[in-house]
Image: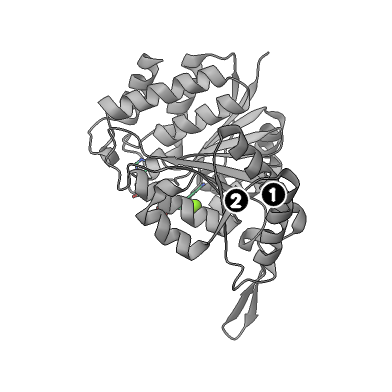
């Protein structure tokens, strides 16, 4: 069976790390065919829209998508793309690797972030006279759906579940979120802990080891997972998966890194680990394991890109990963 992979590098270092990850996928050779499509600031300048309809069609037709990053147009690209593939769960593992100078080397956790609503619903108003508002949407159906996904994900891995929220202040919206999670846990006889999201930020920084799978509303998941990136050695290491529906979209957590874009020194690890999540999603578990083991070997022994204290290029790191497969 040949799976078709849409490849959307986007802007900045997306153009560097995504081709590196595609080379790794080609080396693993699970019989994928690749179709490239454009999105982001550059294509917006050329065609007037950061997300051409043809890109949406390519992504929807593909079995999975590997995405890099978009610049200023990120919200206009990634939110519709996640919607286009029907994704409602954003899975973000944050793990410290041997050989990487991490603030908290004991970190090994996974954020399961609600991906469709909350404060990112896009309902903002300018009421004039310096007054602006934002509507936070939290539905029982989406909260149940992410809870079911999170409990399943944790059960498969024998992991504990922590639920982040701020229901003491956002009583109605996060109240709905928490009640929905609780109903799902009840139905499954599953255990979980809850943490206020602000307190969780402190506890993550001080003692990440006590957490496994963290289920969170959209904004909390966005912020806390970036915090976790800091604990494990930087944004260049964190992959993510937008899943839930059959079709999935896989992307590094980082952005376009304009400060280093074009220099060929971006860390391809996050993109390569995103490709490993793509492999797993399509059922190539052994290949995914192989890629992860190769990445871990390279992180431990080098070569390393400058963000990890080395002087290697993106290609050199990708070559090193490929030679270990
Ligand atoms: P960023 O993730 O692009 O960069 C933050 C810092 O981390 C920079 O110092 C950068 O050099 C470093 N960094 C990130 N990835 C790296 C890698 N693979 N290797 C080495 N160093 C790496 O976030 P920032 O600066 O907040 O945003 C830059 C642009 O990216 C903005 O236009 C933003 O809108 C966009 N962005 C897009 C996202 C997406 O498409 N999903 C996500 C986040 C930001
Ligand atoms: Mg973010």
Q: Give the residue drawn at x 36%, y 27%.
A: 296
Relative horizontal placement of residue 174, taking residue 230 as reference (left or right): right
> In the rendered image, is residue 67 in sight?
yes
> Residue at horizontal 46%, vertical 15%?
27
User: Residue, x 63% and y 44% (percent of image)?
Assistant: 150
Q: Quadrant of the C terminus?
A: top left
Q: Which mark is residue 109?
A: none
What percent of the width, then of the height, locates residue 241? 57, 38
**The N terminus: image quadrant:** top right
Along the horizontal axis of the image, is 43 left or right of 270? right
In the figure, 282 relative to 146: above or below? above
| SS at badge 1 | helix
Disc 2 packing (10 Å; few <14; some 14–19; many ≥20):
some
Q: Viewer-proximal residue, 21 or 196?
A: 196
Q: Position of residue 190 (x, y in %)?
A: 66, 45
Where on the picture, by quarter, is residue 159? top right
- 254 relative to 261 in the view: left or right: right
Residue at numbered disc 2 = 192
- Evaluate if marks 2 and 1 touch, with contact meaning CB atoms under 8 Å apart: yes
Residue 40's image quarter? Answer: top right
Q: Quadrant of residue 319?
A: top left
Tell me if residue 278 comes above or below residue 150 in the rendering. above
Where is residue 208? Give x, y as percent.
Answer: 40, 49
Q: Residue at x 43, y 36 (%)?
A: 270
In whole angstroms, how far apart are the C-alphas of marks 2 and 1? 8 Å
- What is the x, y in percent for residue 243? 64, 38
* Residue 213 vs residue 295, the one in the foreground: 213
On residue 185, which mark appears? Answer: 1
Q: Earlier in the sequence, mark 2 or mark 1?
A: 1
Query: How many numbered marks, from 0 up?
Result: 2
């Amino acid at each position: 069976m040949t799976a078709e992979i849409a490849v959307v590098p986007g802007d900045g270092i997306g153009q560097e790390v995504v081709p590196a990850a595609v080379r790794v996928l080609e080396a693993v050779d699970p019989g994928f065919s690749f179709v490239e499509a454009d999105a982001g600031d550059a294509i917006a300048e050329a065609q007037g829209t950061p997300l051409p309809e043809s890109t949406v069609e390519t992504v929807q037709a593909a079995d999975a998508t590997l995405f890099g990053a978009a610049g200023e147009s990120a919200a206009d690209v990634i939110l519709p793309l996640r919607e286009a593939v029907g994704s409602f769960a954003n899975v973000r593992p944050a793990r410290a690797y041997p050989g990487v100078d991490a603030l908290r080397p004991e970190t090994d956790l996974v954020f399961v972030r609600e991906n469709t609503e909350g404060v990112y619903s896009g309902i903002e108003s300018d009421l004039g006279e310096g007054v602006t508002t934002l509507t936070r949407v939290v539905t029982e159906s989406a909260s149940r759906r992410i809870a079911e996904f999170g409990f399943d994900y944790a059960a498969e891995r024998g992991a504990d579940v922590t639920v982040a929220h701020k229901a003491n202040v956002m009583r109605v919206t996060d109240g709905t979120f928490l009640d929905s999670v609780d109903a799902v846990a009840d139905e499954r006889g599953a255990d979980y802990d809850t943490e206020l999201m602000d307190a969780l930020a402190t506890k993550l920084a001080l003692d990440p080891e006590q957490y496994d799978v963290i289920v969170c509303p959209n904004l909390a998941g966005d912020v806390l997972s970036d915090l976790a990136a800091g604990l494990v050695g930087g944004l260049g290491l964190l992959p993510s998966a937008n899943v839930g529906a059959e079709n999935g979209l896989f992307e590094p957590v980082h952005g376009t890194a304009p400060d280093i874009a074009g220099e060929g020194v971006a860390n391809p690890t996050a993109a390569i680990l995103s490709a490993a999540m793509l492999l797993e999603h399509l059922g190539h578990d052994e290949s995914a394991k192989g890629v992860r083991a190769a990445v871990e070997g390279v992180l431990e022994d080098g070569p390393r890109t400058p963000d990890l204290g080395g002087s290697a290029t993106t290609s050199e790191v990708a070559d090193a990963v490929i030679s270990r497969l």
